[in-house]
Image (cartoon, grey):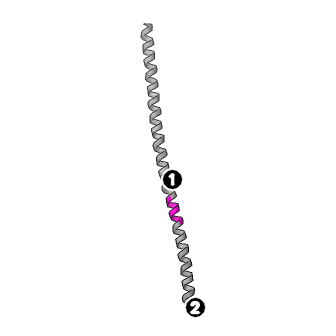
Amino acid sequence: MINYKKIINNLTNLFQLSLLTTKDIKQEIKNLIQFKKEKTMNELNNSHSRDLEELKNKINSLKLEIQKLKKLVGKR
């Protein structure tokens, strides 16, 4: 009877450990997916902000060119 309880106890412990490890693995996979998602979103946000900055710079340079052209046309 004592051997039977030991075996059951050992099996129970093994089962609990395996549940913990599968939960840990599942959580780790969730974390990895979340991290990749956040990384991708940050890259997209950064590219959008860089694109916006480039567009702002182009608009400013075009404004300067328009002002120069207006001055040239005004002189003639």
The circle on residue 75 is 2
Which mark sits nearer the N-terminus, 1 or 2? 1
Asked if the residue under mark 2 is in contact with the one under mark 1, i.e. CB atoms within 8 Å, the reply is: no
From this view, report whether residue 62 is shown above or below residue 6: below
In front: label 1 or label 2: 2
In the picture, the quarter occupied by the C terminus is bottom right
**Residue 44 screen position, x and y as percent:** 48, 56
**Residue 33 screen position, x and y as percent:** 45, 43
Judged from the image, the secondary structure of the residue bearing numbered disc 1 is helix
Q: How far apart are marks 1 and 2 (CA)?
A: 50 Å
From this view, report whether residue 30 is shown above or below residue 17: below
At x 51%, y 53%, the residue is 42
Residue 51 magenta-highlighted: yes
**Residue 37 screen position, x and y as percent:** 46, 48
Nearer to the camera, 56 or 4: 56
Q: In which quarter of the image is residue 23?
A: top left
At x 47%, y 37%, the residue is 28
At x 49%, y 60%, the residue is 48
Q: The residue under label 2 is which amino acid type? A: Lys
Question: Dot 2: within a 10 Å radius of its alpha carbon, few (fewer than 14), some, or many (20 or more) residues?
Answer: few
The circle on residue 42 is 1
Query: What is the magenta range?
Result: 47-53
Question: Dot 1: within a 10 Å radius of its alpha carbon, few (fewer than 14), some, or many (20 or more) residues?
Answer: few
Judged from the image, the secondary structure of the residue bearing numbered disc 2 is helix
Nearer to the camera, 44 or 19: 44
Q: The residue under label 1 is which amino acid type? A: Asn
Report how many numbered discs are placed on residues in the image: 2
Residue 50 magenta-highlighted: yes
User: Outermost residue, top direction?
Assistant: 1
